[in-house]
Image: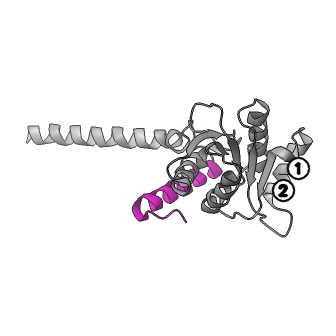
Amino acid sequence: MKKAIITLSIVLGVLVSLSAVTFFGLGFYLSPQDQLQKADAIVVVSGGQTTTRANYGIKLFKQGLAPIIIFSGGALDDGPSNAIAMRQQALEAGLSDDNILLDGDAQNTYENAVNSKQLMDSVSARKIILVTSPYHQRRADQTFRKVLGSGYTVLGSSAIDSRWSKSNWWQSGFSFNISMSELRKLIFIQTTGSYQ
């Protein structure tokens, strides 16, 4: 009996430890970051804090990390697309239209990837830096890698999102909910193989 209690205590201890590691590590899991290096294009997908994402992509462009920047994202209402709004930010920051490609139709991450691939292929871009919000980075990376296939390289690099932190993702309603949403979508991808 004593041996069974000790064994049960050890098993419960291990389960509690694994649960804690999983809980506290979720933010780090959702937000993988690749080491930045020169690429053929920077792809910025809209959503979340779109302005912040665009500014980060513009910053990377100005650092000389790629000669082309692709803005991807449709309109959420009847106004101009997010891609057009991000383009305007880039022009105001001193970029030239010669270095900007737009996808103003994508309504989700899968469409971001499909539409961006067409633009990438039009300029023979095979290596990209993919910019999104940190909580969205893993799913965006996986989706782009699936759509692009072999022969392409995706380097994930997140813009800072003031509403979310990988080290304390559970501490506000928004960050908890968006983290759970991303986890559900990743589980769906893993169990069904569908990215749409």
Q: Position of residue 174 (x, y in %)?
A: 65, 52
Mark 1 lies on a secondary structure that is helix
Q: Quadrant of residue 6?
A: top left
**178 within the magenta span:** yes
Q: Mark 2: few, some, or many residues within 10 Å (few <14, many ≥20)? A: many
Please indicate whether residue 2 sits to the left or right of residue 41 in the image. Answer: left
Please indicate whether residue 18 sits to the left or right of residue 98 in the image. Answer: left
The N terminus lies in which quarter of the figure?
top left
Q: Is 179 located above or below residue 39 in the figure?
A: below
What residue is shown with label 1?
Answer: 88
Q: Position of residue 93 (x, y in %)?
A: 88, 39
What residue is shown with label 2?
Answer: 84
Determine whether label 1 and label 2 are within 8 Å by CB: yes
- Give the residue type at disc 1: Gln
Please indicate whether residue 39 sits to the left or right of residue 7 in the image. Answer: right
Q: Residue furthest bottom?
A: 78
Q: Is 23 located above or below residue 190 in the figure?
A: above
Mark 2 lies on a secondary structure that is helix
Please indicate whether residue 13 sits to the left or right of residue 134 in the image. Answer: left
Observer-nearest of 177 and 93 = 93
